[in-house]
Amino acid sequence: VRAKYTNPRIAFDGERWWLSVGIQTARKLKPLRGLLFVCKERRYVRSEGIGIDLGIKDLAILSDATKVRNINKTRAIRRLKKKRRRLQRQVSRKYQMNKKEESYCKTSNLIKSEKRLLRINHRLAHIRQNHVHQATSAIIKRKPSFICLEDLNVRGMMKNRYLSEKIQEQNLYEFRRQIEYKARWAKISVIIADRWYPSSKTCVICGHVKKDLNLSERTYVCPVCGNVIDRDFQAALNLKRYGDAEQMTSAS
């Protein structure tokens, strides 16, 4: 391929070396082999749009009631996190034992423990990344007419010290990034709802906005029409309606 290669970068993540290169070419590059299904439109019938609500309890809830599980609740992740905590305490104790005045003397055992800890962190990151790839690819494979997501303020959400770790583990921004580039390959429009759109607080039946809905309230009870529904599922339904309205506006 005749191309211009730019901005080469070499990075070391503590275990492996990585080389990245930017490619500028007039020809349209094909996506990775494992994602070629998004280009074969003849195999799939385009379905109606999908609204997706991202969260902590579940990674995502779709407007057709499909749930994408929280991978961090699985046994494999819990075991790795337990092992990581044990290694972190072990490394901390070894640092204190080998402290000499203001400096530390790294022994071979300490270096080995740090490498084991690094491998566990990489393993956790790869499991979460793979889970997001599988979830986003499955959504794109449905060939919806559009996908509507919330414009989540992830940086602001991270300021909550009680939820910051769980939010970071969910890879919410990575989920949106993958949806956007995979949808672009499949020629599916992605609609980002306004950041202040009250998707969880708006009753899907009568449209009443319950302004005092707390985060701890997982079930939405409408004081006007009596509608009782899971708040995350309702948010996904409202996002689908938001996407439908945007599609109609752009078509007119």
Image (cartoon, grey):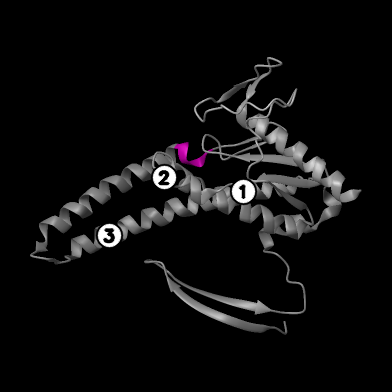
Q: Give the secondary structure at mark 3.
A: helix
Q: What's the mark number on residue 165?
A: 2
Q: Are marks 3 and 2 in contact (CB under 8 Å)?
A: no
- Asked if residue 63 can be seen in this view, the reply is no
Rendered image quadrant of residue 187: bottom right
Q: Which of 231 and 207 is in front in this view?
A: 207
Three-letter code for the amino acid on which mark 1 is drawn: Gln
Check the image and name the residue furthest to the right. 252
Question: What is the magenta range?
Answer: 70-74
Rendered image quadrant of residue 177: bottom right
Q: Earlier in the sequence, mark 2 or mark 1?
A: 1
Residue picked out by circle 1 = 134
Q: Give the secondary structure at mark 1.
A: helix
What is the x, y in percent for residue 36?
73, 59
Q: How far apart are marks 2 and 1 (CA)?
A: 22 Å
Q: Which of 134 and 96 is in front in this view?
A: 96
Is 193 drawn above or below residue 36 in the view shown?
above
Check the image and name the residue furthest to the front. 211
- Asked if residue 237 can be seen in this view, the reply is yes
Q: Distance between the residues labelled 3 and 1?
A: 30 Å
Three-letter code for the amino acid on which mark 2 is drawn: Glu
Residue picked out by circle 3 = 114
Please report the residue visible at 69 percent of the width from the left and 16 percent of the height from the top.
Answer: 224
Q: Earlier in the sequence, mark 3 or mark 1?
A: 3
* Mark 2 or 1, closer to the camera: 2
Please report the residue visible at 77 percent of the width from the left and 72 percent of the height from the top.
Answer: 28
What is the x, y in percent for residue 168?
46, 48
What is the x, y in percent for residue 157?
49, 45
Q: Give the secondary structure at mark 2.
A: helix
Rendered image quadrant of residue 148: top right
> In the displayed structure, does residue 21 sit left or right of residue 49?
left
Magenta span: chief secondary structure: helix
